[in-house]
Structures are given as structure tokens and as C-alpha cells.
Amino acid sequence: MKKAALRKEYLQRRKEIPASEINQYSKKIHDWLFQSFPIHQYAVIHTFMPIKHKNEVNTELIIDTLRKDFSADIVIPKSHDDGSLTNYSLKKDTILLENKFGVPEPINCSPLTVNPKDVDLVLLPLLTFDKQGNRVGYGKGYYDRFLTQCRPDVVKIGVSFFDPVEVIEDVNPGDIRLNYCVTPNGIWSF
């Protein structure tokens, strides 16, 4: 299938997941992540904040565990109209406000941003992915642009409520593949 059709289908499928199952599936993803990856080896971990009205994976569970049990710098993005992301350290006193898309973003950040080259691991939002590690997001390209600024060895982990589709037919040369994708059912490696 092509990205537009997959985007439409998986937005609808995710919308139909009851809230209780969102939390249950998010917890399974959380557990797989911390059981299967050497999280303690990563100094800077970039994650997205969930768009709750779009039933995204609840990364707040992951953030809570990182804060409690790990010393990594947790980094979250702030999007801009030009399609870029600025990245800030998430501190306990960071105030978040939803942007026009419903993404919680930092509003009281320090003027110091985090350089994408310093990021060791990125947790990526997505709607679906295929067995080759290609992902379908919302179609704005924020993360593909951001990932080109990261080091080549940055670990890219998608999180999804669904197992992969066979193939995304219209992958672009600028699309950056995942290294892994974590679902409630397990981990896919590419």
C-alpha cells in the first residue's frame, strides 16, 4: 500500500483503540523497551510527547522510568512552521503546552538547545511501518529532517500499537529507516 492509504487506515485503526487498551499497550511497549535495549548506555535520549487525542503511544511511561532509574538526558522536540524541530532537555520543572497539532511542547525552556549530533537514541512516533523498517508518520517530514542532523550511528526506535505491513510502496530516498520498532507483541529489528 501507499503512504496516503496507510496513513488513513492506521489513523482510523488507532482512533478505535479504547483508552484502557492504549495504556495497556503502551505499558507493554515500555516493558519490551527496557527489557531488550541497553538503555543505561545512552547519555542522550530523544522522545516525542504523545498526542493524546490521536491515541499515540504513551511515552510518559517511558519518561517516568528514565527519570527514576537512569541518568540519561531526556530530550523532547518543539516544532516550527518551517518543518524543523528544536530540541530541549526535559526537566522536572519544564512546563508543556499543546501546540496547534496537540503535541505537548516545552514553553519555559532554557535558551540552550540540544544539538542533534549529541543524541544517542531516538524514539519515533509513527502510524505504521513495514518489514524493511520504513515508517509512515503524519506526512510532514519533521523527523526525517531531524534524523539527517543526527549522527549516522544514532539508534532509531519506532513505537507502534500494530505489527508491520508487508511493504510501503512509495518510500522516498529521503525517508530514514528505523533500526527497530517496538510493539505490544515484541520487537522488530531491521
Image (cartoon, helix red, strand yellow):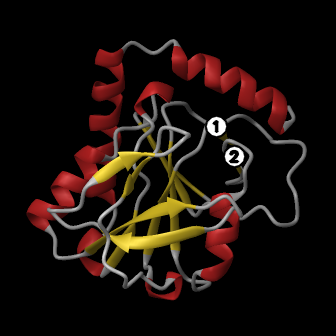
Expressed as whole percent of the image width and height from the top left, the position of residue 67 reads: 15, 63
Is residue 101 shown left or right of residue 94?
right
Q: Is residue 186 left or right of residue 177?
A: left
Figure check: 98 above or below 178: above
- The quarter of the picture where the N terminus appears is top right
**Which residue is located at x 35 percent, y 59 percent?**
106
Which kind of residue does numbered mark 2 sit on? Lys
Under circle 2, the secondary element is loop
Q: Which residue is mark 1?
A: 164
Please provide percent x and percent y for residue 116.
52, 81
Q: Please name whichever residue, 29 or 14, is drawn nearer the observer in this view of the structure.
A: 14
Residue nearest the viewer, comparing 81 with 114: 81
Quick check: 12 left or right of 6?
A: left
**Residue 16 in the image: above or below residue 58:** above
At horizontal 63% and vertical 25% (from top left) the residue drawn is: 11
Query: Which label belongs to residue 22?
Result: none
Side (left or right) of 175 relative to 21:
right
Residue 76 in view of the camera: yes
Q: Are marks 2 and 1 in contact (CB under 8 Å)?
A: yes
